[in-house]
Image (cartoon, grey):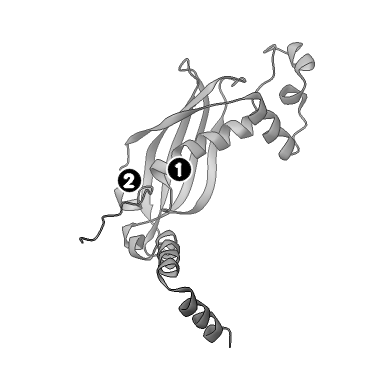
Amino acid sequence: MSEQKVIEQRGLWLDEMEVGATYRHAPGRTITEADNTWFTAVTMNTQALHLDAAFAETEPFGQRLVNSMFTLATLIGLSVTQLTQGTIVGNLGFSEVAFPAPLFHGDTLYAESTVLDKRNSKSRPGQGIVTLEHRGYNQDGALVAKAVRQTMMFDSSHADGAPIASAQQARSAQRAEPPQQAESAQTETGK
């Protein structure tokens, strides 16, 4: 029996990112009233524009707005599987965030990201800084959110030692090991 090929989903390594390239992320995310209410409540943001329909009807947009922090989080989240899943060290910051148009319940958020810049870290071998511009559009193509984000990314030298791969390998080894052997190994390490 031949060994089965396994392909693991991941983002891009630093050295795979190309300055100037734009990535369109799929699928989009339709925002529901429940999403907005839950996020607003869990983050303790009691802004009536998000929670109080009667109040919001008297305001300029005439209806409740999707919490802009939810919009930002979702915009970044839409990019994860394509760009940073398992390849990011962490976020360094946001240098620009804007919400040029509102997002409402029932709208669908679509996202794309452009690599603005990248460079190797001077102090962290195998890592580098990538600057990404994320843009979110509603179903009508209106720009509803934009954010410039700096991230610390691993380069492909991290591929063999990635924590995700190591954790998966450990789980696979545990499943393959008979229970008695696993128990005796735990006893030995517990001494």
Q: Residue at x 43, y 30 (%)?
A: 27
User: SS of the residue at dot 1?
Assistant: helix
Location of residue 71 in the rendering, given as x and y in whole percent from the top left corner: 58, 31
Image quarter in which the N terminus is found? bottom left
Q: Is residue 130 or residue 48 the one in the foreground? A: 48
Q: Is residue 40 above or below residue 104?
A: below
User: SS of the residue at dot 2?
Assistant: loop
Which residue is disc 1 drawn over?
80
Location of residue 29 in the rendering, given as x and y in whole percent from the top left corner: 51, 28
Q: Is residue 25 left or right of residue 136?
A: left
Location of residue 11 in the rendering, given as x and y in whole percent from the top left corner: 38, 47
Location of residue 54 in the rendering, given as x and y in whole percent from the top left corner: 79, 14
Q: Is residue 151 above or below residue 104?
A: below
CA gap between label 1 and label 2 equals 14 Å
Q: Residue at x 69, y 14 (%)?
A: 63
Q: Is residue 46 left or right of residue 139?
A: right
Say which amino acid is labelled 1.
Val
Q: Residue at x 24, y 61 (%)?
A: 3
| Residue 17, disc | 2
Q: Residue at x 71, y 25 (%)?
A: 50
- Looking at the image, is mark 1 or mark 2 earlier in the sequence? 2
Q: Is residue 118 or residue 26 the one in the foreground? A: 26
Q: Residue furthest bottom?
A: 191
Question: How many numbered tags mark residues here?
Answer: 2
